[in-house]
Amino acid sequence: MGDGSTVVCAGAGTPYSAQYAADSASPDCGHTYLRSSAGQPREAYTVSVSVSWDVEWHGGGQQGVIPGQQSQAQVPLRVAEAQALVVS
């Protein structure tokens, strides 16, 4: 996640739906940053993603599995921080 945390998710995840508020927690797999990315290189965390899956196929009276398909990517993610001061 770029902040020293690792998240491992099983399954395909939850499809997007407008019923989930942007500030709500992930229904099945997510991460909450506890600090902003200020002070990081380019003021952003480098998030690395790796996806692995097996492909099952059927056709022409045959079937099979192609195991171990993988895809990887990295993206810079700027995380802002808002602070509140409670008075009284």
Image: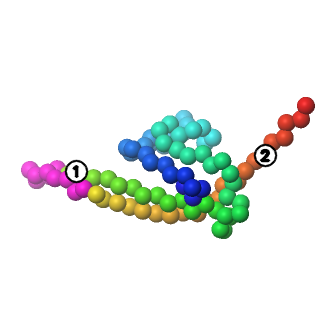
The residue at the far left in this view is 61
Image: magenta residue range: 58-67
- Measured Cα–Cα span from mark 1 to mark 2: 49 Å
Task: Please say whether residue 62 is one of the residues in the magenta stretch.
Answer: yes
| 18 to the left or right of 38 | left
Quadrant the C terminus occupies? top right
Residue drawn 52% across the image and 44% down it: 30
| 54 to the left or right of 30 | left
Give the numbered dot on residue 26.
none
Q: Amino acid at mark 2?
A: Gln
| 15 to the left or right of 87 | left
Q: Dot 2 corresponds to which residue?
A: 83
Residue drawn 48% across the image and 42% down it: 29
Report if residue 76 is visible in the image. yes
Residue 9 in percent (x, y) is at: 43, 46
Residue 69 in percent (x, y) is at: 30, 59
| Occupied quadrant, residue 15 | top left
The residue at the far top in this view is 88
Q: Dot 1 corresponds to which residue?
A: 56
Q: Secondary structure at mark 2?
A: loop
| 55 to the left or right of 26 | left
Q: Amino acid at mark 1?
A: Glu
Viewer-proximal residue among 19 and 67: 67
Colour setting: rainbow
